[in-house]
Amino acid sequence: MKGSAFQREFALFLVLFFVIWLLSYLLTRRFPGFVDWGQVVVAREVAFFLKIFGYNFTQTGGTIVFFTPHGGESLVIIPECTGLYTSIIYFSIIGAYPARIGEKLAGLLIGLPAIHVLNLIRMVFIAWILYEKHELFELFHGYLWQAGFLIFMILLVIFWLGKIVKVKAPGGAR
């Protein structure tokens, strides 16, 4: 692909990405009940695993309160804890990339559940850190898991591009 053709295609990708991202984000603002529901779902899923692991806590809505040896700790599931915004970014990348509809659907069917599962693992791990080593909470929550999630999403897109999307042959045929 020549330089100017690449630049046009990349510019189109960026515009489409931004439009899809913006519309998806605006939908979350328009329907806050969906976001609230997501917070409660994630809290219930985290609570499910915490019960399995034998932790002492209560869960009300999107808040989990622990009764720890060092006192009470609250884990409040906010919209950013649901994986929704990461999913919107992933959805926007897949939607904006020039691939066939079937390839995009496959990317979404693989990627969105994978993001949800990793987010659930992240939230259970963060709850565990909060319970056991609350002094490490900010390090894991604010830094390590953020970087890990970004790397995971990049690898997910690379996997999708490498294993599912068929590369265009010169001249536009696939």
Image: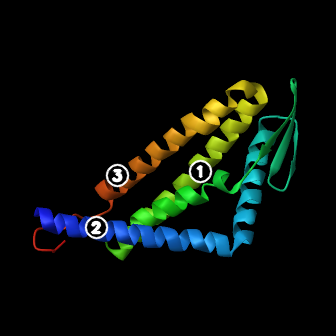
Going from the N terminus, do you reach mark 2 or mark 1 first? 2
Assign the C terminus to one quadrant of the image: bottom left
Q: Residue at x 62, y 42 (%)?
A: 122
Q: Nearer the viewer, residue 52 or 97?
A: 97
Q: Earlier in the sequence, mark 1 or mark 3?
A: 1
Q: CA distance from mark 2 to mark 1?
A: 32 Å
Asked if residue 106 shows in the view, the reply is no
Give the numbered dot on residue 158. Answer: 3
Front one among 137 and 60: 137
Q: Amino acid at mark 3?
A: Ile
User: Going 66% across and 33% down the picture, which residue do you hit?
Assistant: 138
Which residue, given by chain and number where applicable, does mark 1 sit on? Answer: 117
- Element type where label 2 sits in the image: helix
Q: Position of residue 104 (x, y in %)?
A: 39, 69
* Residue position for label 2: 11
**Marks 2 & 1, CB-CB < 8 Å contact:** no
